[in-house]
Amino acid sequence: MPDLLLRLGHRALNRMASLGRASMLWVASVFWLPKPADLYLVVRQIHNVGVLSLIIVMLSAFSIGAVLALQFYTQLARFGAQDAVGVGLAVVLLRELGPVITALLFAGRAGSAITAEIGLMKSTEQLTSMEMMGVDPLRRVVAPRLWAGFISLPLLTAIFNVVAIYGGVVVGIEWLGIERGAFWSGMTDVVEIWEDIGKGMLKSVFFAVVVTWIAVYQGYDTYPSAEGIGLATTRTVVYSSVMILALDFLLTLSMYGDF
Amino acid sequence: MRMRTVEISVGAFVLAGILALVFLVVRVSGINFEDSSTYSISARFDDVAGLKRRAKVSLAGVVIGRVSHIQVDTEYGEAVVHMEIERRAGPLSTDTGAQILTEGIIGSRYVSLLPGADEEVLDDGDEILDTQGALVLENLIGDLVTNLGS
């Protein structure tokens, strides 16, 4: 029994220490704004995490928009309210599904890649050699990835929303024959710039911070072995997904919970 | 050469993201650049029965404003409803009436204005005096039961 308590305490202290290291890493690198000469590092990372995630984000967005329109239509048509498909689609996408699903895809596609890359750099002692050459790996490796994540995820979310609405238009208007005017005017009547679009984008900024932070930290803190990298990559995806969903609930509660 | 394609693709990506945002703002939220200035009027009701902030204010079925906030006056036991009315809807006369109606059977509550005939018009901060609160189903049934009983 005392042995169990000892191990429990040990684990708790380990978690605390790892949270502390993660916070120090974040503070040390996030306040480093890229100098104009180092901007190409950020551009290259935006390419890696943003541009390369574009296809998976757009494909998922299209199918999600299409399937939402289909589901809304079958339910709403029973009340003869199929014109409300546009409203339902836009509100659900802008407020919840857009930011959340884009962040989940981003964690799987880009977060895992960041972790594996930095983890391998650590395992092959590239980070240590950088330090020996007087190059700060936080500035050279970590900070550009953090900033690229902050920039890419909100942009991906906006693209996701547009493509998903287009998917809804294809299914709803072109296929199921909802009247085009009613679809769009219902949407524009209800959707508001700050309440729906602004808050949704704000959510994606929070998710961007959380996902890139977890990804970078897990890579930086990898146990330097092949197994360690695999474990760290898995952790990135699992932790990010759980954090995104938990954070989404808290954000929705504070943004829309009207009590 | 490699770096150049990266730069071009990142530029296109950022542009696409910004365009997507512009599309959302313009097409989906339907921002309008018309005169959107409003003025505030208030009305007292004996019962608003779940009227909510941001509920519609309509005149002859056309939405001309929104409920900005609702207070309760404990002294008189009345609800004070503040409304933002769009200026471009035109002036409302001082004897305009207000009643609380329900959209459909289970729809949300909204404020319906009844046109007045007075020459003077309502301005910012004025109050509508001729009001009729919401019909509460329980009260109606209660009245019916007492009437049947007598």
Image (cartoon, coloured by chain):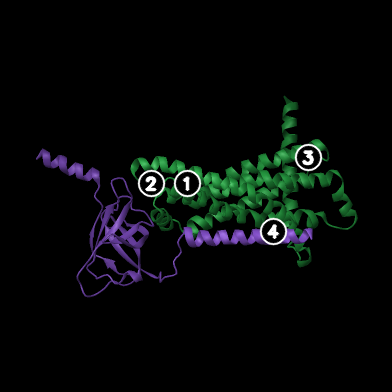
Chain colours: A green, B purple
Q: Chain of mark 4?
A: B
Task: In the rendered structure, find residue A82 and report the number of the disc placed on it.
Answer: 2
Q: Chain of mark 3?
A: A
The residue sitting at 45% across, 41% down in the picture is A71
Instruction: Give neighbour class at mark 2: few <14, some 14-19, many 20+ (Cα, 10 Å).
Output: many
Instruction: Give neighbour class at mark 4: few <14, some 14-19, many 20+ (Cα, 10 Å).
Output: some
Amino acid marked by disc 4: Ser
Residue contact at pointers 4 and 3, CB within 8 angstroms: no
Query: With B122 as the anchor, is B118 left or right in this view?
Result: left
Q: CA distance from mark 1 to mark 3?
A: 42 Å
> Camera-side residue: B113 or A184?
A184
Mark 2 vs mark 3, foreground winner is: 2
Residue contact at pointers 1 and 2, CB within 8 angstroms: no
Q: CA distance from mark 4 to mark 3?
A: 29 Å
Q: Is residue B145 above or below residue A251?
A: above
Residue contact at pointers 2 and 3, CB within 8 angstroms: no
Q: SS of the residue at dot 3?
A: helix
| Residue A3 % position (x, y) | 75, 26
